Image: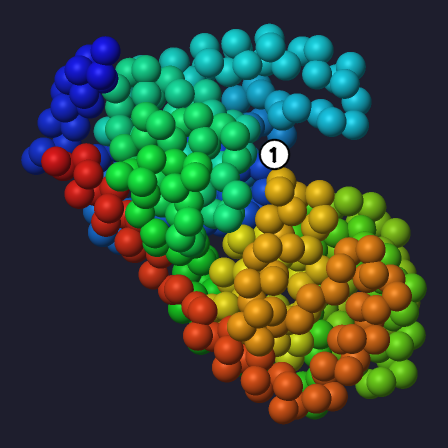
Amino acid sequence: MNNKPADKTQEATTSIKGGEARYIIAGGGTGGHIFPAIAIANAIKRQQPSAEILFVGAKGKMEMEKVPQAGYRIEGLDIAGFNRSSLIKNFSLPFKLIKSFMQVKKIIKEFKPNAVIGVGGYSSFPVLKQAQLKGIPTFIHESNSFAGKSNIMLGKQATKVFVASDKMEKFFPASKIVITGNPVRTTIAQSKVTRAEAIKFFGLNESKTTVLAVGGSLGARSINQALANKLHEFQKHDLQLIWQTGKTTATDFILKGKEYKNVWVGEFITQMEMAYAAADVVISRAGAMAVAELCVAGKPVIFVPFPFAAEDHQTVNAQHLVDKHAAFMVKDSEADERLVNDVIKLSVDEGMQQELKNNISKLAITNADEIIAKEIAEAIKG
């Protein structure tokens, strides 16, 4: 039973010898999946300039916008995730899944990939599953400390599974695991932006302490609400705020923020290297990619973990840094009461800021994308 896929894999990989490799990168849904995927794609192109890369994502999701902006082609699938808030909306899921498998079958037949890379998000499952049925080498990048169910199922037949940390054997076969860390966008990992340039970019005052608040691409209601309720405190303590609201109920918060001259507010920050360079203190969710970027940026941070993430893995992520005196944490349920006060305390304590900077910087991994690209190339060349 295992011989057949192995034979097909060998057949699929021999075609790249002397020719150009063709890769499909599948997944998306949030910036935490999309930006690492683009980082991996960029690393592949640096190492193999003639390689062809095709992204596959879900129609209507942010990858359909962000991937083309990065210069790559993307195909969209008619697929949706399980809706926990409205069970009736899940009625069409089986039909969408069947349709997506038909779409994937056509994409793979026409593109003829030498390897398929999954970065998470529900659109990655049909692509990797179809590739595995065809005997095409598949690779998974699992950014979190608790693996998603789709990745666990796919990991059994994957060629390699790239993970951010140790102790992932409970999810994947130990022989397939490669610890690489999480890929960080090149614009952040190799940023040369000065604080002065970044402050000017946001139209703020270089002489004032600046707080950056990010709750992910979709937004974090608890963070947004806590800030909205106490924006006057930032003004009172002569602090500036760069506030990414995310898409969820963005309009209300943007209108509130624009009432203050010391606040830059917007739904999404495209050039995050500018935001990190401008920030003296950061407020953030504790998703795996946010943590990875903040380690590279080396910023004092207060994490507000999303409490409903699978297995509460954001709290685990944040606690890992707190235990190393590399960050602070405020519980989501306590954000309204504590967050702004704790940020103000940290913003005036330069000694603590420096300690956090030093400790979080020690945890930075800047070349995960290069390691992943190299591992994939070596694996498919045999």
**Label 1 packing within 10 angstroms: few (<14), some (14-19), many (20+):** some
Q: Position of residue 213 (x, y in %)?
A: 71, 65
Q: Residue at position x 45%, y 43% from top?
A: 142
Q: Residue at position x 50%, y 82% from top?
A: 358
- Dot 1: what SS? loop
Q: Position of residue 299 (x, y in %)?
A: 57, 75
Which quadrant would residue 104 be assigned to in this image? top left
Residue 249 in the image: above or below residue 298: above
**Foreground: 107 or 293?**
293
Q: Is residue 62 visible?
A: no
**Foreground: 235 or 301?**
301
The answer to whether residue 291 is left or right of residue 137 is right
**Foreground: 213 or 305?**
305
Number of marks present in the image shown? 1
Callout 1 amino acid: Lys
Residue 109 in the image: above or below residue 218: above
- Residue under pointer 1: 61
Q: Residue at position x 50%, y 48% from top?
A: 145
Q: Position of residue 270 (x, y in %)?
A: 59, 56
Q: Residue at position x 60%, y 69% from top?
A: 322
Q: Quadrant of the N terminus?
A: top left
The answer to whether residue 378 is left or right of residue 83 is left
Residue 286 in the image: above or below residue 135: below
Q: Position of residue 254 (x, y in %)?
A: 83, 57
The answer to whether residue 256 is left or right of residue 349 is right
Identify the image's colour scheme: rainbow, by chain, secondary structure or one colour.
rainbow
